[in-house]
Amino acid sequence: GQQLNQSPQSMFIQEGEDVSMNCTSSSIFNTWLWYKQDPGEGPVLLIALYKAGELTSNGRLTAQFGITRKDSFLNISASIPSDVGIYFCAGLQYNFNKFYFGSGTKLNVKP
Amino acid sequence: NAGVMQNPRHLVRRRGQEARLRCSPMKGHSHVYWYRQLPEEGLKFMVYLQKENIIDESGMPKERFSAEFPKEGPSILRIQQVVRGDSAAYFCASSPRDNRNQPQHFGDGTRLSIL
């Protein structure tokens, strides 16, 4: 299957700091999604991106679909304790018609 | 995660038994996807189904695993003769149409433990 490299694997930050994480691939993707997963629960969709260069915000979250279509990043501004969790990127290629998931970025926020 | 219902939330089986995991998609969704997640890892695609059809089962082991999505009722992921390595969280997702421009919405998963 396609490989999505998500980084960093984990982050320890102070409350109020900004956070940035990204996903890269050697392949082109048609859609990028960002999910957050809390312990014991399923992933919850945060942001969906459909066009190269697209920049979309959802509250304190901003995500971009890279111009090369091979990457995407997610920024969280002014982090708060409830931002703690694992963030996953997912990329879709039309010809394969399924999403490939990154291995996740585990975010820890110190109050 | 309101909408996609998975049950049971936790399932314990002994080696050699069968495990049946159920998924009811969101209302109006006719496409179901099953994923497997090991601790500290991402989601691995297993199978994609529409009503009464398996569209893509390329991520599902050829033996002991099967999936169905009947015309009526939930989608079922069935694991026969379970082994310790089957212990994982199994997530179901649904979408109203195929993947193109239709994000998947996930259930809260079934945590399968094999004794």
Image (tube, rainbow, N blue to C red):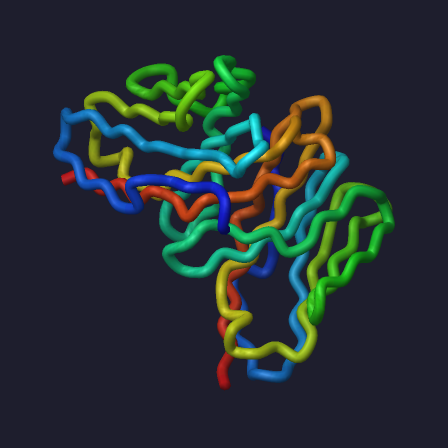
* Residue positioned 60% across, 51% down in the render: A45
* Residue positioned 39% across, 21% down in the render: B67
* In the displayed structure image, the side of residue A58 where residue B47 appears, left or right: left
Residue B101 in the image, given as x and y percentages of width and height? 73, 36
Closer to the camera in the image, A48 or B6? B6
Quarter placement of the N terminus of chain A:
top right
Q: How many marks?
A: 0
* Residue positioned 41% across, 37% down in the render: B36
Residue A89 in the image, given as x and y percentages of width and height? 62, 49
Residue B98 in the image, given as x and y percentages of width and height? 65, 27
Q: Quadrant of residue A46?
A: bottom right
* In the displayed structure image, the side of residue A78 where residue B48 appears, left or right: left
Closer to the camera in the image, B69 or B64? B69
Vertical position of residue B63 compared to residue B89: above or below:
above
Vertical position of residue B28 compared to residue A84: above or below:
above
* In the displayed structure image, the side of residue B29 where residue A61 appears, left or right: right
Vertical position of residue A27 compared to residue A13: above or below:
above
* Residue positioned 61% across, 37% down in the render: A3
Q: Quadrant of residue A11?
A: bottom right
Residue B78 in the image, given as x and y percentages of width and height? 31, 24
Vertical position of residue B69 compared to residue A35: above or below:
above
* In the displayed structure image, the side of residue B40 where residue A68 appears, left or right: right
